[in-house]
Image (cartoon, grey):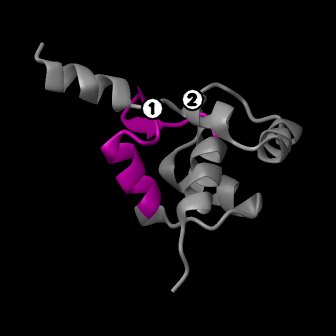
């Protein structure tokens, strides 16, 4: 492994790291919802779950996040499933980065 590859590996952040870097208020909000850590939500269910909790997200953004590895998923049968906790952390961290036109 070259030095460049080592640096890139260190730059990869997990959702756990992102969760720990969120402000206390946002972490308390996520904990108050008490999301399950088990991968149970499909792409369409993620959209409904995150939207019901008041976070703006599109189905295309969910699809791209899963494909890019931003949103960790597991294969269950023939579908990719995501944990509700991971979906909320991803959506909250994404909402902080969004810039409206």
Viewport quadrant of the N terminus: top left
**Residue shown at 75% from the left, 61% from the top:** 52
Q: Which residue is mark 1?
A: 13
Q: Is residue 8 above or below residue 91?
A: above
Residue most extreme to the top: 1
Q: Are marks 2 and 1 in contact (CB under 8 Å)?
A: yes
Residue 39 in view here: no
**Quadrant of res 51:** bottom right
Tag of residue 38: none
Residue most extreme to the right: 32
Residue span colored magenta: 61-84
**Residue shown at 47% from the left, 63% from the top:** 59
Which secondary structure lies at badge 1?
Answer: loop
Which of 13 and 44 lies nearest the eye of the viewer? 13
Residue 14 in view here: yes
**Residue shown at 84% from the left, 46% from the top:** 25
Horizontal and vertical percent for residue 56? 63, 68
Horizontal and vertical percent for residue 90? 57, 46
**Residue shown at 58% from the left, 36% from the top:** 18
- Between the C-alphas of marks 2 and 1, the distance is 6 Å
Q: Which residue is mark 2?
A: 17
Q: Is residue 92 above or below residue 2?
A: below
């Amino acid at each position: 492994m070259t030095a460049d590859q080592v640096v890139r590996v260190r730059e990869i952040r997990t959702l756990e790291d992102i969760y720990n870097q969120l402000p206390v208020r946002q972490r308390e909000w996520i904990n108050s919802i008490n999301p399950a850590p088990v991968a149970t939500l499909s792409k369409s269910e993620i959209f409904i779950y995150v939207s019901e909790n008041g976070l703006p997200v599109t189905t295309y953004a969910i699809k791209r996040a899963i494909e890019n590895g931003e949103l960790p998923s597991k294969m269950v049968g023939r579908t990719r499933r995501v944990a509700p906790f991971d979906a909320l952390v991803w959506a909250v961290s994404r909402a902080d980065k969004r810039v409206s036109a």
